[in-house]
């Protein structure tokens, strides 16, 4: 599977700006907003969506809060690796150096391990 970084970045750009934070009770919020408009997600189980075990909902809230900054950073990393790979491929097409092929293998492996 190849990650569509443009679509993922568009989803990031369309989301409420960050940073977000998990306030410890399953609520993810944006602190810069007025109190009544802070909530981004409610993973507390108050809506009756969990089975009584609050641990998954608290972990979900932590994940959601960090995803707002983690995903854009990961996309930047994927874009940088893809740009490096394109440069290496261009160098190989020009005849390149013997080391270029090894560098390409390292970059390709990094992209594959990251699912990009």
Image: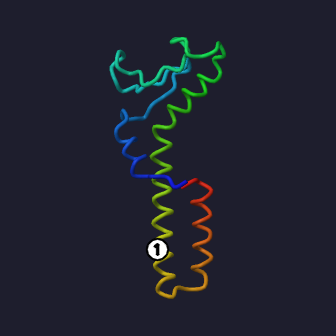
Question: Which residue was labeled with disc 1?
Answer: 87
Residue occupying the point 48% across, 24% down: 28
- In this view, the residue farthest toward the bottom is 95
Residue occupying the point 61% across, 27% down: 59
Give 69 or 12, whichever is nearer the viewer. Answer: 12
Residue occupying the point 43% across, 34% down: 19
> Residue 75: percent from the left, percent from the top?
47, 51
Q: Quadrant of residue 50?
A: top right
Give 31 or 45, whichever is nearer the viewer. Answer: 45
Mark 1 Cα within 10 Å, few/some/many (few <14, many 20+)?
A: some
Quadrant into which the N terminus falls: bottom right
Locate residue 32 relative to residue 110 in the image: left or right. Answer: left
> Residue 53: percent from the left, percent from the top?
66, 16
Q: Is residue 87 above or below residue 74?
A: below
Q: Is residue 30 above or below residue 80?
A: above
Residue occupying the point 33% across, 19% down: 34
> Residue 98: percent from the left, percent from the top?
60, 85
Q: How is the image coloured?
A: rainbow
**Local SS, label 1:** helix
Locate residue 31 relative to residue 112 in the image: left or right. Answer: left
Give 18 or 115, whichever is nearer the viewer. Answer: 115
Report the label total: 1
């Amino acid at each position: 599977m190849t990650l569509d970084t443009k679509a993922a970045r568009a989803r990031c750009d369309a989301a409420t700006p960050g940073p977000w934070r998990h306030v410890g009770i399953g609520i993810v919020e944006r602190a810069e907003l007025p109190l009544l408009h802070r909530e981004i997600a409610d993973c507390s189980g108050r809506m009756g969506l969990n089975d009584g075990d609050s641990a998954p909902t608290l972990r979900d809230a932590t994940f959601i809060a960090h995803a707002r900054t983690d995903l854009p950073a990961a996309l930047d990393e994927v874009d940088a690796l893809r740009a490096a790979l394109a440069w290496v491929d261009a160098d190989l097409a020009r005849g390149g150096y013997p080391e270029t092929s090894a560098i390409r293998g390292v970059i390709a492996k990094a992209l594959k391990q990251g699912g990009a």
